[in-house]
Image (cartoon, rainbow, N blue to C red):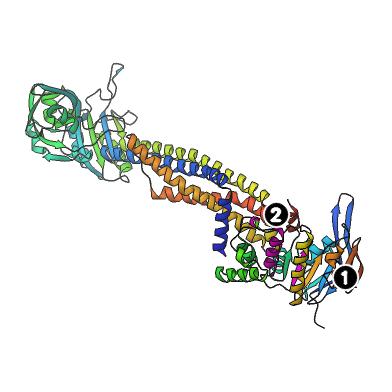
Amino acid sequence: MAEPVIRVVALGKSYATAAGAFPALRGVDLAIDRGEFVAIMGPSGSGKSTFMNLLGCLDTPSSGDYFLVARNVAQLGRDDLAKLRNRTIGFVFQGFNLLPRMTLEDNVALPLVYSGVDREPRRQKARQELDRVGLGSYAQSLPSRISGGQQQRVAIARALVNSPQLILADEPTGNLDSQTSEEIMALFSELNGEGITVVLVTHEPDIAAYARRQVRFRDGRIVSDTPTPPGAAAAC
Amino acid sequence: MLKAMLEEAWHAMGANRMRTVLTMLGMVIGVGSVVLMMAIGQGAQYAVAQTISTMGSNLYILISGSTSTGGLRSGSGGGPTLTVADAEAIAELDGVSNVAPVQQGTQQLVYGPNNWSATVVGTTPPYLDARAWTVLSGYPFGDSDVRAATRVALIGQTAASNLFGADDPVGKTIRIRQSPFVIIGLLGKKGQSLDGRDQDDTVIIPLTTAQRKVFGNPFPGSVRMIMVQATSAQAMPAVEKDMTALLRQRHRLREGQDNDFFLRNLAAAADSAAETTRVMSVLLGAIASVSLLVGGIGIMNIMLVSVTERTREIGIRMAIGARQKDILAQFLLEALMISLAGCLIGLILGAAAALLTNAMTDMVIVISGAAVLVAFAVAASIGVFFGFYPARRAAALDPIEALRHQ
């Protein structure tokens, strides 16, 4: 079997607090293969956000190893992590996080600016991704002119623009109504169907039901790792 | 990449126009005042240099010294210690180009119904070269005029216009102390001297004529002053030494006895005048630079506010792959653009103010390319210097913290 996209071994992360070191993650082992669609669940304080930050190369672990596409990134410097975030990972956030002063096209093209792509190919690629999420006709609009669901689609287009190995979505439907949530989750399912690995953090079971595998966190540890029961998605 | 960043910096400046304009204003005022002050300073230096050049260069003036008779000491020029023969002897020294004995005083000039009081200078032909006089029309008098004590005169522009109005003075006859003098030449214009006297309010006549017909001279052969010009500034110290030794010997002064003449170095006076204006112009520039500094601090202030306001944006950029140096470059570029734009406007306004000053007053204004270049370089370095701290702060932000920032 090929090397998994994500493999973490005994991953630990502690935060210094006034009361001493607080362990947010206490030795997590997990492997996610290419093409998987995984939901990471758990109550707040369970360590899932910390885990997500580590997976997203936004933070470095206190102990353990993290292999992203067979490369151990646990001890990389800030610039190398930035490069991984740029090329290997696509982020989708709860709050969409589009830059308000830029057109949708420029927002989508922004990761390409940081990977040094020229203006014209940058625009073409951005248009292509906007078309893919069905918003090609809004390319020159500002984010404030479109709805929340549309903004999240643009954010997904931005996550896709550098052809990443992995999409990380942190509560992507947290700010959306249930109708729009379904559309966004359908989009994720569609992307996953095209072979893109998707890891999703959520605390809503009906959102997690779109994934094919559910990993539950509690007190900094994985407490369960199960395939989604068939038919669960249809229940909502 | 750079182009994309320039565009972004442009957008960021446009996003808060009022604030950008106010920040720029600091630079505008700073650069504008530096340009204006330097223009005024350099103008003053230029004006002084002009005046000095009309005075004649590398000049010494020997003035006959005090005599002491029974405890009563006369002031400088009080005794008949210098002679025409002294002047002739000095002219033989190495490094001396022109020597002219001078007897001068203020006299009433009369032409028909007009009369006018002016400085009358009795001297020999080398005087014209030593003092950088030119003859505009007519011709100068020669050594034969001095020998024969002819009654001829060269007239300066101020004296000429007061006596003759717009008429050509050459060939006309004026009277000085009842003696008629034929004007044989009109002198070129010189303007004010360093001490503010009008140098053109002058009539120059042969020394011998001056002593016999105008001033009178109780001690034949003596003169009050001798003008000595050295061939170059380098030759001046040697000339000074040789001249002093020569005169002491000719006047039979013993070792330890005071000089019976005074030696004044006009070049030193010119240097000190030039130095004064140089210091003034540096001072003006320094004061103006303070406002440039304040403008720079204004930029830093606004950039810090901007970094705080845009923390979330910085977090997003980092999350999608901006390296620290990308963020650093972005904010540095913004600071640089604000300061350069401010500088450009400042240059234009400063130059306009300088030209306006030139038009409204009689101050001499010189805008030099060097001053403009310096102002530009300083503004750019201020942008980088004061933009660096906020930019580094932005680059050092933790991406997770920045993303969480509301």
- At numbered mark 2, what does the secondary structure look like: helix, strand or loop? helix
Mark 2 nearby-residue class (10 Å; few <14, some 14–19, many ≥20): many
Chain designation of label 2: B
Q: Is residue B37 left or right of residue B2?
A: left
The magenta stretch is A144-172
B131 versus B218 height, above or below = below
Task: Check disc 1 and report the residue beneath it.
Answer: A232
Residue B179 image point, x, y percent: 8, 24
- Asked if the residues shown at circle 1 and circle 2 are in contact, with their CB atoms under 8 angstroms apart, the answer is no
Residue A16 visible here: yes
Mark count: 2
Outermost residue to the right: A223
* Residue at 19% over, 33% down: B101
Residue B236 image point, x, y percent: 31, 42
Residue B61 image point, x, y percent: 27, 34
The amino acid on which the numbered mark 1 sits, given as a three-letter code, is Ala
Task: Check disc 2 and report the residue beneath it.
Answer: B312
The amino acid on which the numbered mark 2 sits, given as a three-letter code, is Arg
**Same chain check for tags 1 and 2:** no
Instruction: Determine if the magenta segment contains residue B236.
Output: no
> In which quadrant will I find the N terminus of chain B?
bottom right
* Residue at 28% over, 36% down: B60
Q: In the drawing, what numbered circle is on residue B114?
A: none
- The alpha-carbon separation of the residues under discs 1 and 2 comes to 37 Å
